[in-house]
Amino acid sequence: MEINKETISEWLKNLQDAICLSLENADGGSKFEEENWIRKEGGGGRTRIIKEGNIIEKGGVLFSAVSGDTPDFLFKESAHSASPQPSPEEREFSIRPQFFATGVSIVIHPKNPMVPIIHMNIRYFEMDGGVKWLGGGIDLTPHYIFDDDAIFFHSQLKNLCDKHHKDYYSKFKKWADDYFYISHRKETRGIGGIFFDRLNTEGNMNFEKNFAFWQDVGKAFAPTYTELITRNKHKSFTEKNKDWQLLRRGRYVEFNLIYDKGTKFGLETNGRVESILMSLPKTAGWEYDFKPEKNSEEEMTLSLLKKDIDWI
């Protein structure tokens, strides 16, 4: 197929369909509800939410395709732009390039604290002047870290990356470690994964090859996460485990509201707030100066929330 913004958007909608079906089958109870929305400045999307299922307490698989005047904060990123930056006069009179952005974003919060939270996003961006790039990633946030699951998850991502470039996994894993980091806590959000942005710039300009890799990231989500659901959905848990789950969700909230660039982009471009904040869990918790018991599973999990762990 010809690769342009229309065909990319259509491929993403088909991906959204496939992922929603896989998650409904894995959950075995709840179904996605869909809401279509329009952005007055240009574009829109379809938000699909699943809640109160057998496995999934709250989750979303979101598609959007938005366009219009390039927001101010993107003007500052001249190092990644092939087009000249606007003059002060152009800024004052709002003479600015047009942009188009489309993507699929996913966050799943399970009921059982032994099943991990997962996030994936793949996105395409273009701007007047020939600027275009691909970005995205997938990362895992277990409430409790199980070595076998971490090895499986990172092995899946490494195999995917190795199909396209021998350096992708190490490069994009480090990027995820650095990006999904709660600096005020000095801990990572979870066990990381891969993260990349502006693929198709800085000397890596083969768009067809980059697009194939980007597609494979999107297609990896469903088989990887449904396997993790299958492994953990029947594990028993206690009230103590549920309390810990709420604290880990609290950390998730902190990252998404303070650091996440997708949240910032959505709010800066007047996106739909309900869809932007879909990533937040139904419930979360904060306890003052919480310290886990010595030699507990909670303490072990905290000890592994660090950058640069070699999981495989």
Image (cartoon, rainbow, N blue to C red):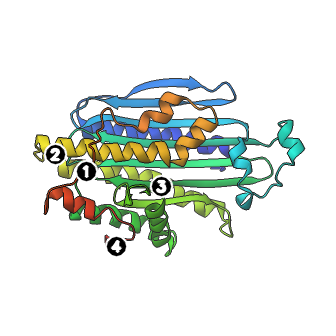
**Label disc, if present, on residue 192 of the rendered structure:** none
Question: Mark 2 highlights which residue?
Answer: 241
The one nearer the camera, 150 or 10, is 150
Tell me if residue 143 can be seen: yes
Residue 232: image location, x then y, percent: 18, 50
First along the sequence among labels 2 and 4? 2
Residue 277: image location, x then y, percent: 46, 34
Q: Is residue 235 left or right of residue 94?
A: left
Q: CA distance from mark 2 to mark 1?
A: 9 Å
Q: Is residue 279 above or below residue 141?
A: above
Question: Mark 4 highlights which residue?
Answer: 310
Q: Amino acid at mark 4?
A: Asp
The one nearer the camera, 308 or 99, is 308
Question: Mark 3 highlights which residue?
Answer: 137
Q: Amino acid at mark 1?
A: His
Helix, strand or loop at label 1? It is: loop
Question: Mark 1 highlights which residue?
Answer: 143
First along the sequence among labels 1 and 4? 1
First along the sequence among labels 4 and 3? 3
Residue 305: image location, x then y, percent: 32, 61
First along the sequence among labels 3 and 1? 3
